[in-house]
Amino acid sequence: MVVSMGFNEMEGAFIEWYPRGYGVAFKVKRRLFAIQTDYQRLEIYETEGFGKLLVLDDTVQLVEVGEESYHEALVHPVMLAHPNPRRILVIGGGDGGTLREVLRHETVEKATMVEIDEGVVEASYLYLDVAKDLLERLIKGEEKRAELIIGDGVKYLRETDERFDVIIVDSTDPVGPAKLLFSEEFYRSAYEKLNERGLYITQAGSVYLFTNELIDAYRAMKKVFDRVYYFSFPVIGYASPWSFLVGVKGDIDFTKVDLERAKKLDLYYYDPERHETLFQMPRYVRQLLEERK
């Protein structure tokens, strides 16, 4: 778990400390906004070279310059592996970046974003240049292909009658309160709400520093989904490489993606033509994952 972190005004830096003294730091010019929402402490900083920085409970959520390195990896591999992703559920992702990437796919007929903290949506709309226009349309109810629901994603998934082709969980790290989103019970709810052929994806923390959490989540998903894949990607602002887990329902082959659809996206970080490179994982981590099936 993250052990300590915060803004050092004397040094003009924000530092997030991970286990064993590993830190990720940004030099900042000033703090633009700070508020205690109903759920967490939210802060926004202006950095020297990476745009604005969104921080929740002293943990980096995104930095504007390079945020696509996370959102592209979270969204496009599953969207391009699914043969026809029409109905999409995003849990979390109040900054709008994940939904923005989802809606780049022409196949999408309806996307639902369930965010528990309205404060994240409002602050992201007011201060960040990640998905400002999209968030404005969502807030006003004017986005034709997507809707915003302010509520508990766990409860929504358990109670909804909707079925989805792809479920994307854009949550905080797999420690503390967010651990419920990495439980076998939650995975079963997700599996039940997928269509006969469906994909589920979640971020799963730092490969090196959240290894035990990654293994536990992988093992829980293996009990529920027909197949489970793990992959990693270098994400700007995080203790990279960052891990992701994909659960499959039905006969979808996640090792293959639709390159014709991919050509229309003109992606910057994730390379669909080299999709196989996603699956590189340090040997010892792979061995640990496979040992604890």
Image (spheres, helix red, strand yellow):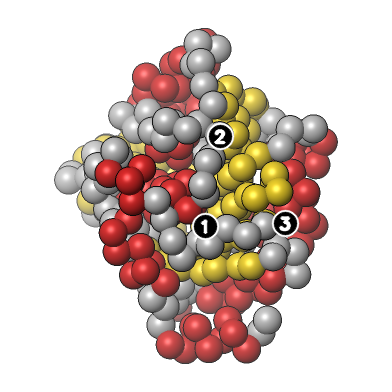
Report, in whole angstroms, how far the alpha carbon at label 3 lies from the one at label 2.
Answer: 21 Å
Taking the spot 63% from the left edge, 60% from the top edge, the residue there is: 251
Q: Position of residue 186 (x, y in %)?
A: 75, 53
Q: Is residue 92 visible?
A: no
Which label's residue is closer to the chain start, 1 or 2? 2
Q: Secondary structure at mark 1?
A: strand
Depth order, front residue of 268/31: 268
Q: Which mark is residue 187?
A: 3
Tell me the mark number nearer the camera, choosing from 3 and 2.
Answer: 2
- Density class for disc 2 (Cα within 10 Å; few <14, some 14-19, many ≥20) is some
* In front of the other: 17 or 187: 187
Q: Amino acid at mark 3?
A: Tyr
Q: Identity of the amino acid at label 1?
A: Gln
Q: Quadrant of the N terminus?
A: bottom right
> What's the distance in space between the residues labelled 3 and 1, CA to CA?
13 Å
Where disc 2 sits, the SS reads loop
Per the rendering, the mark at residue 86 is 2
Measuring from the top left, give residue 208's x and y in whole percent: 44, 76
| Count of marks, rendered view | 3
Marks 1/2: CA–CA distance: 22 Å
Residue 257 drawn at (x, y percent): 41, 55
Residue at the disc numbered 1: 203
